[in-house]
Image: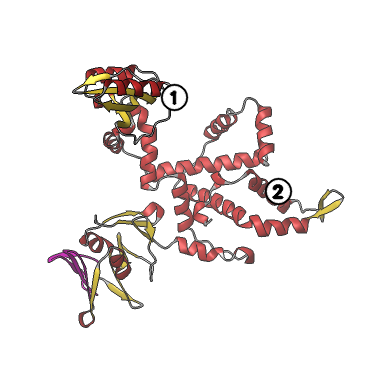
Amino acid sequence: MSPRRLSYYFLSACLLGFLYVTLAAAQAPMPPTIAVVNGKPLTAEAFHATMEEGFARRIFEVLVHRRLVFDEAERIGITLSRAEFEQRVAAAKGAYPSEADFQAGLRQEGITEAYFLQRLKTEVLLDKIVEKRGTIPDGEVAAYYEKHKDRFVRPAEVYLWDFSTPELEAAYAMARRMNAGERLSETAEGLTVGWHSRAQIADPLMRETAFALEIGQASSPIYVEGNYHVLFVSESRPGLHRSLQQARPDIVEALRQEKGLTREAVLDSLVRDARIQINWDPLRYLNAEYLALKQIRILVDGKPLALPRPVLVVGDRLLVPAKPVAQALGARLTWVADSSTLVAERGSAKVTFTAGKPVALVGSTPAVTVAPRIEGGILLVEARPLIQGLGAALQWEPGVNTLYIKSPEK
């Protein structure tokens, strides 16, 4: 698990217990033998060795995250009043039936109340940082509601089995089989199966019958336009009618996910932007991982793209290695060495870049761009004209340091 995937909220109780014991040990040195189990000593040396081998990384990351949250809160002027914090503590304790149950929960988790309060303070500050990084405008919430209204406003539906036959006796026979509980294949001849609302059933008698049937009950044959229909309902789901105001919390959370404004995404960005230098040998390997987090990732149709050189940020523009990105989109490349010009073609789409020239050709139309450059033998070009010029779509998500590319439709 990389540092960007770990936060306070995914730690096991076991890990938290180890963390507390380790911090306490820093103030009160452990005796050489910390316990005796079945007459055999459990030594402080063995304890520390196990910590180093199995838990040191995760504990280190917890401490790093705590430091980053407190530093960011101080940097952007976030404070937490005593009254506000006491209110949050009361709310957290209120989840337990009594103070005794709360204390029992702490013991089960392996932490002290002091550690619980420190963790809660960190969570509250992180929530405040998330809020300050960007609110979701009411207009965006309303637009999301209208676009995804089926998620919040849905009519009552039944999972309807409709057996159709021109023969009345065959219809009665099927009704008897259904009422007897016989398991039928959804692909059986004469059967159509699926979820239906009232509006999706054209015939009035079939519509009223379908919504009057109890689960597991088959209807008598219904004659409609030359065929007898036997209806059977195996499931139903009630209508969903959530107003914009009722759906708002879920919509805000969905938009926060899209914008990289979740707790995890914000914590990731704090780790990515931090200056972290690890000097302890068992964890020194993390230096390379933290460095890698600072590099922009490119995902093409959801799959990571291997890059020969890192993406560059010039102002608010991204310069990407032209060859791997264009090839990932199925483009054919032509390199003109004399003029340091790259031509990328995909079907009728064509984009032309020349190193050092701040104008690209998208088809035959000039487009102002950051001047392409050659570094280490790799041509770097501005992402947007290259990707859109080849008919693909792109989305830059700074919150997760990722450029998403969607290939053109085949």
Mark 1 neighbour density, 10 Å: few (under 14) some (14–19) many (20 or more): few
Residue 347 magenta-highlighted? yes
Hey, which residue is sitting farthest bottom in the picture? 338
Q: Is residue 297 left or right of residue 367?
A: right
* Residue drawn at point x = 26 percent, y = 26 percent: 165
Residue 237 visible? The answer is no
Q: Nearer the viewer, residue 322 or 4?
A: 322
Residue 171: percent from left, percent from top: 30, 22
Q: Is residue 382 left or right of residue 44?
A: left
Identify residue for label 2.
21
Q: Secondary structure at mark 2?
A: helix
Residue 218 magenta-highlighted? no
* Disc 2 residue type (three-letter): Val
* Disc 1 residue type (three-letter): Gly
Q: Is residue 206 left or right of residue 38?
A: left
Mark 2 neighbour density, 10 Å: few (under 14) some (14–19) many (20 or more): some
Q: Secondary structure at mark 1?
A: loop
Residue 237: percent from left, percent from top: 38, 25
Vertical placement of 358 versus 91: above or below? Answer: below
Identify residue for label 1.
181
